[in-house]
């Protein structure tokens, strides 16, 4: 399996501004002061190996859309945030006019998780099959509503693809194409569901828009079981811990620190911080990643946990 | 986990010992909130002496946050003092140092509480 991140930002898409790019460039030039580069490749290698991540990259701006690539012809994707637009382009390019079968797994129907669907190219291609899997009773209504006049000019009924809505059962492993999928209820306004995907002894958990109250042992243990031994856990780490349990308590999101604690309890192998706060710039997000890594070092038991921060374009092979 | 306390003028100093995590946070919250309710109001203060606190998890940090909210709502104050290096780093990593006033020693925290509490503390 391969996990490919098309959208990693929470709540609303963000874009780097001209000032942001100028600032990154100026900082890179200062750091490289006195260095000379004989070729583009040499400069590229320097940027990749010696400059801070937040100078040479951006964590990105699209709202949640995460592809799980598995053997076979079908596509698997969690959420249809604005990252669904480039994901759709990827599907169309790869299919080369051959109709696709796309399985969507919907965490919940808040706007940042469905807003990309009206711009999802394959939905306009005759012969395409799109199966939207989820647990919410309101799933189909939400998809149809956002494409209704006066909010969007193309009505859902005008889409060319064959679109089906598939209700999944909570906490029950179900076979969907090449994957076994288990949804799990999460604490979020209107409820959200995490998904555990398994195949050939490998597992990835997509758990976003989920607040955790770890003082509740039963809740903590239920999530540790859901994450148990996962090769990769994609985790809602929108805030620093102090923010998550003070001014933003009960907003339905979690923190980098709680992500480390739950993954350690679960003996998961790789934590990927996800659903980045739109107000945080790249330097702040890199800071939160470094803090999570240090917390993991401080609290490590007999098994190390790898910690990464998701960015648009990241690929993880399992 | 063990908690003992001593009162100096309008301040309670709570000495917290052991590990503060999922297993101990409920008991600790009960003890801390009882001090907050009785004394951290109308300018009164709680000083948490964490010199013997070995570890604090997110569940433990939440106890401090609950106490802080309660104290603020009744015009009381909470200060944190004498953190061991690991606990100090966890405070920084979790950004709790931005929410709480953290002092290197209980003496310095008592100085921030006020002259009367500080004098009572110096007297012993």
Image (spheres, coloured by chain):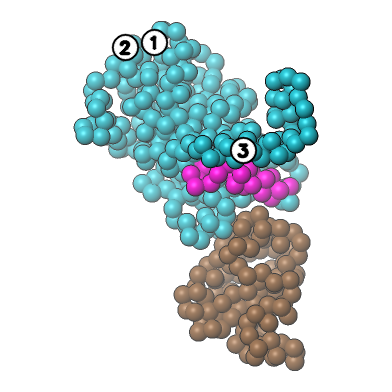
Residue occupied by mark 3: A24
Subunit of mark 3? A
Q: Is residue A200 visible?
A: yes
Residue at the spot 45% in from the left edge and 8% down from the top edge: A96
In the image, residue A193 lies in the stretch drawn in magenta: no
The colour chain B appears in is brown
Residue A137, quarter of the rendered image: top left
Answer left or right for A32 relative to A13: right
Residue at the spot 35% in from the left edge and 31% down from the top edge: A167
Q: Foreground: A28 or A60?
A: A28
User: Marks 1 and 2: CB-CB under 8 Å?
Assistant: yes
Residue occupied by mark 1: A99
Tell me residue A238's x, y (percent).
Answer: 52, 46
Alpha-carbon span between mark 1 and mark 2: 7 Å
The colour chain A appears in is cyan
Which quadrant of the figure contains the C terminus of chain B? bottom right
Residue occupied by mark 2: A126
The crowding category of the residue bearing disc 1, from other C-alpha atoms within 10 Å (few below 14, some 14 to 19, many at least 20), is some
Q: For the magenta stretch, what is the residue range?
A: A275-297
Subunit of mark 2? A
Tell me which label, 1 or 2, sits earlier in the chain. Answer: 1
- Give the number of the disc on residue A274: none
Up/down of A276 relative to B32, above or below:
above
Answer left or right for A143 relative to A232: left
């Amino acid at each position: 399996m391969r996990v490919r991140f098309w959208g990693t930002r929470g709540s609303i898409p963000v874009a780097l501004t001209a000032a942001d790019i100028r600032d990154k460039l100026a900082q890179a030039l200062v750091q490289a002061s006195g260095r000379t580069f004989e070729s583009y490749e040499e400069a590229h290698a320097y940027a990749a190996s010696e400059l801070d991540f937040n100078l040479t990259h951006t964590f990105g701006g699209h709202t949640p859309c995460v592809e799980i690539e598995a053997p076979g012809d079908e596509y698997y994707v969690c959420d249809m945030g604005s990252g669904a637009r480039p994901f759709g382009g990827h599907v169309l390019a790869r299919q080369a006019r051959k109709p696709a079968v796309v399985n969507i797994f919907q965490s919940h129907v808040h706007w940042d998780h469905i807003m990309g669907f009206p711009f999802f190219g394959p939905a306009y291609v005759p012969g395409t099959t799109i199966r939207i899997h989820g647990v919410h009773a309101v799933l189909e209504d939400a998809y149809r509503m956002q494409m209704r006049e006066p909010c969007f000019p193309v009505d859902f009924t005008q889409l060319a693809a064959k679109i089906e809505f598939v209700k999944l059962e909570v906490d029950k492993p179900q076979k969907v194409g090449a994957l076994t999928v288990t949804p799990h209820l999460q604490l979020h306004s209107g409820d959200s569901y995490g998904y555990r995907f398994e195949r050939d002894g490998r597992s990835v958990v997509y758990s976003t828009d989920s607040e955790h109250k770890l003082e509740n042992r039963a809740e903590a243990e239920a999530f540790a079981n859901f994450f148990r031994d996962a090769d990769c856990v994609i985790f809602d780490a929108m805030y620093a811990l102090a923010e998550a349990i003070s001014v933003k308590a009960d907003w339905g999101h979690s923190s980098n620190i709680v992500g480390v604690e739950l993954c350690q309890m679960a003996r998961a192998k790789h934590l990927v911080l996800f659903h980045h706060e739109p107000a945080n710039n790249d330097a702040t997000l890199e800071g939160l990643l470094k803090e999570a890594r240090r917390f993991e070092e401080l609290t490590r038991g007999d098994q190390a946990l790898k910690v990464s921060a998701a960015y648009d374009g990241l690929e993880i092979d399992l | 986990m063990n908690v003992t306390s001593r009162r100096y003028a309008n301040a309670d100093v709570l000495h917290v010992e052991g590990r503060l995590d999922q297993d101990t946070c409920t008991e600790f919250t009960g003890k801390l909130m009882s001090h907050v309710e009785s004394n951290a109001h109308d300018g009164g203060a709680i000083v948490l002496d964490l010199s013997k606190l070995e570890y604090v998890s997110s569940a433990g940090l939440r106890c401090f946050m609950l106490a802080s909210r309660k104290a603020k709502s009744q015009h009381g104050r909470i200060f944190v003092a004498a953190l061991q290096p690991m606990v100090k780093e966890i405070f920084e990593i979790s950004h709790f140092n931005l929410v709480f006033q953290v002092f290197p020693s209980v003496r310095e925290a008592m100085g921030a509480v006020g002259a009367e509490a500080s004098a009572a503390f110096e007297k012993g």
